[in-house]
Image: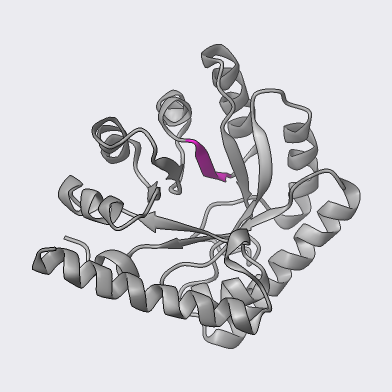
Amino acid sequence: MNAAEQDMQQRLDTLNQMIDTALDTALRNRSGLTLVAVSKRQPLAVIHQAYQLGIRDFGESQIQEGVPKVKACPDDITWHFIGHLQKNKVRKAVLHFHYLHSIDSLSLLHRVDAIATEERVCPKIFLQVNYALDSDKYGLHPEAVETVLEAGLAMKHVACIGLMGIPPANADDERIQAYFQGMVELRDQLKARFPDWPGNLSLGMSGDFPLAIQAGSHYIRVGSKIFGDRI
């Protein structure tokens, strides 16, 4: 193992200790949590290092950067698209990514379903919620989520598996906890309306993932804690 790999292994060991501590606090086990390694702006060599250390879920936020990586990496990787998805990039997203975390409108959902139908695939999707009504963020208004989810659950070529959210920038722990709790409550309300819906949560990034885990997140999106500073 070279020096770069040793550094990444140390970061990953530290990250896993933090994850385990948060899981223990929440009386959860690791089987209900997926770590998505956010590899945006990381070169292929670094992604291959992470792969050699056992990571199999990677997240990209731009189609033009992510698709070449998907094509160049091993087939057993699960790819997550986590950035804002433009309608003219939907076909590439559907063809190359297994999960789409950022479906933020009914029209975008319909486009994903139409293209997935044409391509005979069925991506797993999260509805992105702008729970804090932040003008700087994309996402559905919380009151619109039920209508969009109902439409998605009726579609045959998308699998609406949950909700994604991003807390306000520079929020303190108390505000972040309140944000995550609000997302959990919204999920629970929707789960009561649609009991067969999985209701997964994609919450938590490098700066707040322990709080997200304690709130019950199923997918955390972590970059710098694995890769260090981006190039």
Query: With 47 as the anchor, is 13 left or right in this view?
Result: right
Choose between 55 and 187: the one closer to the eye: 55
- Point out the image quarter for the N terminus: bottom left
Asked if 90 appears above or below 54 in the picture, the reply is: above
Count the marks. Answer: 0
**What type of secondary structure mainly makes up the magenta span?**
strand
Percent of width and height locating residue 198: 74, 48
Q: Where residue 37 appears, x then y in whole percent? A: 38, 57
Q: Residue at x 41, y 71 (%)?
A: 206
Task: Give the residue drawn at x 68%, y 78%.
Answer: 27
**Range shown magenta:** 98-103
Q: Residue 200: give x, y in percent of width and height.
A: 67, 54
Which residue sits furthest left?
2
Q: Can you say which quadrant of the picture contains the C terminus?
A: bottom left
Residue under the point 51% across and 15% down: 119
Q: Is 63 located above or below residue 91 in the figure?
A: below
Write down the quadrant of residue 214 in the picture. bottom right
Q: Position of residue 44 (x, y in %)?
A: 19, 45
The answer to which of 193 and 44 lies nearer the viewer is 44
